[in-house]
Image (cartoon, rainbow, N blue to C red):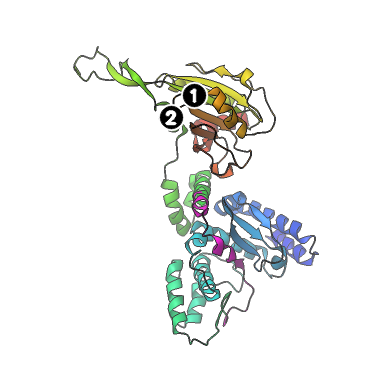
Amino acid sequence: MTSLTGDLERLRQAGTTDQPQLAQTLYRHSVLYLLQHDPFYGHVLSRLNVTVTAPRQRAPLGLVPTAREWQLQVQPQALAQTDWTGSQFLAMLRHTVLHLLWRHPQRYATAVQTAAQAGLVRWATDAAVNDYLTDLPHNAVTSRRLGELLKAPVAPRQDSAVYLRQLRRWQAQQDATDQSLAPGGPASVDTAPVADGHVGWQTATDAAAETREQWRTQLFQTVASTLSAKQRGTLPGHVQAALQPVMARPMLDWRAVLKRGLGQVPAGRQAAYGRFNRRQPVRMELPGNIVRTWQRVAVFVDESGSMGNQEISYLLGQMATLLAVYPAQVTVYPFDTTVDEAASFRLEKRPQHLSRTGGGGTRFQAVFDRLPRLLAGSDQPLVVILTDGYGEKRVQATLPVTVVWLLTSPVTEFSVVDAPGTVVSLTTDPQWQALRRTRR
């Protein structure tokens, strides 16, 4: 902890040109400390995009919305003006994570319309969070501090909505000329600087709100799956309660997605000895019938990604096993910035070994630009893209096809915004993870 306090002291003594770099160093050291001593918070913070902002931001820390996610803004000059110790800075990082875990920015985006309302929301949400934290800055809002303001009993560790109702009742009782509600909160006891900014919450009512909520859910779902059983067992009860719906949500199995895609086009019926004959179920020697499907499948393998030959061969082998049940014509195409048709090959009903030939950048649009040529005249074709997920931000669909993206990275790291089709991460596949460990 001494080193984090030292980082803060160096930030205070530095000039304005050096402060952004020192703030980034402080944040990096803090995340490393939390990964070792408080993994839940460390894993969340390590996955947040952090921006060092201009002096216009009043608060040292704050969550702000983008079109895809919530980002953490750090204001070096405001941070340098605090008297925080290293442990207090860690407490404020935990504070920010709990705001995100409990959906405070999204829940109260529409509740902030005036400066007074902004102050009430800040006090209510901060009190709900800070009651579960220690080593807080001296000006931190807690339920006890709310009780001092309201001059009435305030129960500890309540939902922020409970505190907001109490604060609104208190506000209604104030005289109309009383100016005790300042933008940062009730001014009678709010003389210290704002510790974390809530201004960004007011802009979270745009059309991207649902996208950000999916990102938030996926973030905590990924973190929950990353933690060991022992680490999850040591989490505080309030964190476990918030994570439980996320952890209980079933993960999307990429095999199930492919089966659904492969089984869409019926092509008559075929005999199957694994099925009872419905007309004569007693006669076991008579086969039953299943719906036979036939489909053209194009598999595009990202040659520039983090996948090695062993992992790609495993994935293609898994797909080959599905062909025994879902007959299809599967063609594999390597691609990076272009699709290499000359290196394509037909996937047979047995696992195959693949030798990679490419190795440039990644351009997903090259795949979609080539689809009209490769799949012209096909009835409901299926397109599978094996990639690490790092490429351009936008792609334009060129053909009405079913697309399945198989990512070797978490869904939250996928570069494409509003990607056509279904996006599935392989990070939840135990066999895939075992292959990755053996390769390391």
Separation of marks 1 and 2 at Cα, in angstroms: 9 Å
Q: Looking at the rendering, which quadrant does residue 21 occupy?
A: bottom right
Residue type, label 2: Gly
- Which residue bears the numbered disc 1? 297
Q: Is residue 195 magenta?
A: yes
Q: How far across and how far down the image is residue 268, in percent?
A: 33, 19
Q: Amino acid at mark 1?
A: Val
Foreground of the two, 235 or 304: 304
Which residue is tagged 2? 261
Q: Position of residue 32 (x, y in %)?
A: 65, 51
Q: Nearer the viewer, residue 97 or 177?
A: 177
Query: Which disc is residue 386 wearing?
Result: none
Which range is magenta? 188-214
Q: Is residue 209 above or below residue 305?
A: below
Against 103, residue 128 (above or below) is: below
Q: Position of residue 335 (x, y in %)?
A: 63, 27
Is residue 329 or residue 224 the one in the foreground? 329
Give how far across and how far down residue 411 sits, in percent.
54, 42
